[in-house]
Image (tube, rainbow, N blue to C red):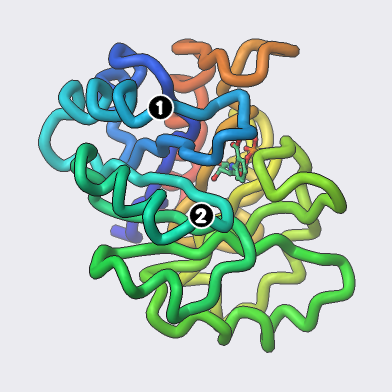
Amino acid sequence: MTRPTRIKLCGLRRSEHIRLAAELGADAAGLVFWPHSSRAVSIDQAAELAAAAPPFLSLTGLFVDPTVQAVEAVLDRVALDCLQFHGNESNEFCRQFGRPWIKGVRMHPEAEVEQVLTEWPDARGLLLDAWHPEQPGGTGLTFDWQRIPAGWRERIVLAGGLTPDNVGAAIRAIRPWGVDVSGGIEYAGQKGEKDSALMAAFVAAVREEDEKHD
Ligand SMILES: O=C(O)c1ccccc1N[C@@H]1O[C@H](COP(=O)(O)O)[C@@H](O)[C@H]1O
């Protein structure tokens, strides 16, 4: 049997969606702490969401160029299992909190990908997202998956514009360790509003593709 593709559903803001993510068999749920996102949650909201999380669902906190104090304020109140840094944070910055962390990497069209991926040696994994000149992530855009070097694919969480319709092709193309989605599980035109049916369809599409590789 081949390994299952790990799944992170990001930008959850309702307790029922945290429980649904676990019931569907997702591995991780992402909470956004970047205040400029329409998916952002306050520390109070996040503490409530964490209280709704069943065992073994990995709660991941997403930050974009936060201060140390901002991360610590969240960690004091919210039982996060993993941190996700999605800005210009260095390896040294990310590692100082003593928690497992992943680094969001935006795939600039001119980046020397193989070189860029070596910049965060202590990350548990690298989450690759589409590059946008004005937004740090969560844009709903895809990028050319073939730019991901073959030798790195086991460490990669693929993100950027994934949906129930294209995630199977993405898995087939590069067999990443995991996949991550936000906009692709939201109601059309309603950024931040998760659709339970799309959450279920996304997880089902990943599992359907996985079964083809057994
Ligand atoms: O979701 C956000 O608001 C966000 C803001 C700033 C940086 C990253 C953000 N989200 C991350 O981007 C991926 C891809 O999003 P999408 O599926 O293309 O909408 C998302 O899963 C988060 O990890």
x and y, in percent, of residue 124 in the image: 36, 70
Q: Which mark is residue 42?
A: 1
SS for tag 2? loop
CB under 8 Å between discs 1 and 2: no
Q: Is residue 65 above or below residue 10?
A: below
Say whether residue 154 is left or right of residue 83.
right
The part of the image, by quadrant, that contains residue 69 is: bottom left
Say whether residue 127 is left or right of residue 18.
right
Q: Alpha-carbon neighbours of circle 2 within 10 Å: few (<14), some, or many (≥20)?
A: some
Viewer-proximal residue among 141 and 83: 83
How many marks are shown on the rendered structure? Answer: 2
Q: Alpha-carbon neighbours of circle 1 within 10 Å: few (<14), some, or many (≥20)?
A: some
Give, as a three-letter code, the residue at label 1: Ser
Distance (Cα) linking label 1 and label 2: 14 Å
Q: Which mark is residue 66?
A: 2
Q: Is residue 154 visible?
A: yes
Q: Which mark is residue 52?
A: none
